Image (cartoon, rainbow, N blue to C red):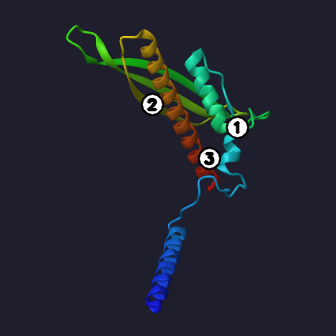
């Protein structure tokens, strides 16, 4: 029985070794690792200045993006500039016989452009969208609270997606 346990351990160790070898051979590189230019994607994300956005929704998205991109504060000499335009749409669903809605979709979309901080040249652009549902209740306060929560979820998803897409962009250019 002891020889079987040793054989099984050797088999597991061999599998781990070959898996690590296969991962190295496929070109896998960690997203936040150092690139050929010596900078990590996280370093480059920290050098992005997020341009101010109008309205309360824009301010909330701006703050979420700052938390993800610039956790130590806005850069003094930004290498990049991020411009984001946010739009919001309500879609009523679940209509009763008396033609009142009981459910709604909140659709938040954001178009973003990453530009060079010095020349203003457009480097990367994209669009992110999030759809979150909430119930329309008889209490107006509860409905407003549900809508506010759906908006917070949508903005969190959008900020995560934008920061992830920018990190992938920076990791890709660091390898060139």
Q: Which mark is residue 115?
A: none
Mark 1 = which residue? 71
Give the CA distance from mark 3 to mark 2: 21 Å
Q: Which mark is residue 170?
A: 3
Locate the N terminus and report the quarter of the image it occupies: bottom left
Task: Where is residue 161? Give x, y as percent.
Answer: 52, 38
Q: Which mark is residue 129?
A: 2
Q: Residue at x 80, y 33 (%)?
A: 76
Locate the C terminus and report the quarter of the image it occupies: bottom right
Task: Where is residue 81? Give x, y as percent.
Answer: 67, 32
Task: Where is residue 19? Give x, y as percent.
Answer: 49, 72
> Comparing marks 3 and 2, which lies closer to the viewer?
2
Give the CA distance from mark 3 to mark 1: 17 Å
Q: Residue at x 71, y 55 (%)?
A: 37
**Location of residue 89 with respect to 122 vertically, above or below:** above
**Location of residue 26 with respect to 87 vertically, above or below:** below
Query: Do labels 3 and 1 touch, CB within 8 Å?
Result: no
Q: Is residue 6 visible?
A: yes
Q: Is residue 121 visible?
A: no
N-terminal-most mark, 2 or 1: 1
> Comparing marks 2 and 1, which lies closer to the viewer?
1
Give the CA distance from mark 2 to mark 1: 24 Å
Residue furthest front in the image? 1
Task: Where is residue 61? Give x, y as percent.
Answer: 58, 26
């Amino acid at each position: 029985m002891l020889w079987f346990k040793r054989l099984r351990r050797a088999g597991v160790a061999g599998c781990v070794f070959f898996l690590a070898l296969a991962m190295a051979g496929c070109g896998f590189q960690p997203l936040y690792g150092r690139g050929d230019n010596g900078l990590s994607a996280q370093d480059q994300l920290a050098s992005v200045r997020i341009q101010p956005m109008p309205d309360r929704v824009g301010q909330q998205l701006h703050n979420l993006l700052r938390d993800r991109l610039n956790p130590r504060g806005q850069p003094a000499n930004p290498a990049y500039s991020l411009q984001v335009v946010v739009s919001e749409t309500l879609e009523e669903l679940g209509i009763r016989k008396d033609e009142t809605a009981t459910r709604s979709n909140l659709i938040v979309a954001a178009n973003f452009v990453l530009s060079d901080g010095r020349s203003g040249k457009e480097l990367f652009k994209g669009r992110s969208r999030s759809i979150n549902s909430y119930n329309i209740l008889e209490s107006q306060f509860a409905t407003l609270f549900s809508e506010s929560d759906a908006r917070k979820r949508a903005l969190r998803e959008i900020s995560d997606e934008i920061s992830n897409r920018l990190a992938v962009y920076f990791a890709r250019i660091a390898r060139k």
